[in-house]
Image (cartoon, rainbow, N blue to C red):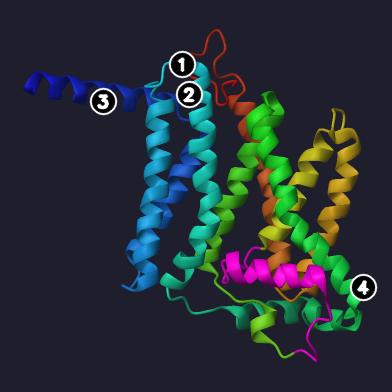
Amino acid sequence: MLELTRNAAGRARTAIGVASRNLAVQDALALAFHAYLFARVSLAPDSPDAAVARRLAFALFFLTAGTMVLVRGELIPARRARALTYRLGLFTPMLLSYFEMRVLLPALQPALLDDRLFAIDLWLLGTTPSVWMQAWNIEPVVEWLSFFYYSHFLVLTLMLVPALFVGRGRRLQELMAGGMLVVGAGHLLYTVVPGAGPVATLAFDQPLQGAFWWHQVELAVATAGAQLDIFPSLHTAWPAYFALHAFAHRDTQPFQWLWPILAFVAVNIIIATMFLRWHWFIDVAMGLVLAFAARRFAVAVAEREERRGGPYDPRQPVWEQL
């Protein structure tokens, strides 16, 4: 029995050592992100939200860390099984972290910073865009922009999920590395700069005059939104990042024809975030900063790690083929 225990401990040490050698930049980013959220909510005052958030944060960290040991530690010998485990074990916790925010942010019992964010808008613009956009408050405009705001979720799905399972090479490395920074930095900043947005802070002349699509947006925000997730605007950062990625690869299919569509959709979503009264201008500005930073980060990471798995590099490729 003692010998079996020693052998198991030895295999675990070996797997952790191999995993450390094989760890990619995006792996370290994901681990640090989940560890931060778990540590942050562990220090929060006790409450029902905190109890749920602690369990969820630990589960997501454990799933991510376990994936790294199994995949980067090469405990899964079959390449295809390892590749699938990596995709699911890395992507799923980052996706679920958005829903984690719904209980984690209230659990932190933050002091909202909307007054300061509004003050920045006043200093920069003399007002905040959602105030002067009240002049556009007619049903066709509300419906148009609500449709694009709601389409954000479709754009996320279509850009990330197919690439995750059929993408390869430099494009996949760039897309996912930058995407990891968008979600990690964005959700981290939610915990540092909490706010509820203009809709909960300012008095407007009248409610938005929308119909079907506006009601879909309201329902989505009420049932799945994290509520205090305004700074930076990830409704800005994600579509802007996708448009930048597509433009950079416009010499390849499908981005030759897709990049202007993504750019058009991104502009409409960005306007919608302010028109629909969810975001301050500074939220959107920081969302754009994050998108451009993520693009630079993606290129730098891809250049650094595209040599992995080559004839003179014993490290595991970042994205093994399915």
Q: Position of residue 169 (x, y in %)?
A: 68, 23
Q: CA distance from mark 3 to mark 4?
A: 62 Å
Q: CA distance from mark 1 to mark 2?
A: 6 Å
Amino acid type shown at disc 2: Arg
Residue 288 visible in rendering: no
Give the mark toward the camera: 3 or 4: 4
Identify the residue at image location x=50%, y=17%.
79
Q: CA distance from mark 1 to mark 3?
A: 20 Å
Q: Quadrant of the C terminus?
A: top right
Callout 1 touching callout 2 (CB < 8 Å): yes
Looking at the rendered structure, which numbered label has been put on residue 78?
A: 1
Q: Earlier in the sequence, mark 3 or mark 4?
A: 3
Q: Earlier in the sequence, mark 1 or mark 3?
A: 3
The boundaries of the magenta stretch are: 204-232
> Which residue is tagged 4?
140
Looking at the rendered structure, which numbered label has been put on residue 82?
A: 2
Q: Position of residue 241 (x, y in %)?
A: 73, 47
- Would you identify the image quadrant in which residue 317 lies? top right
Element type where label 2 sits in the image: helix
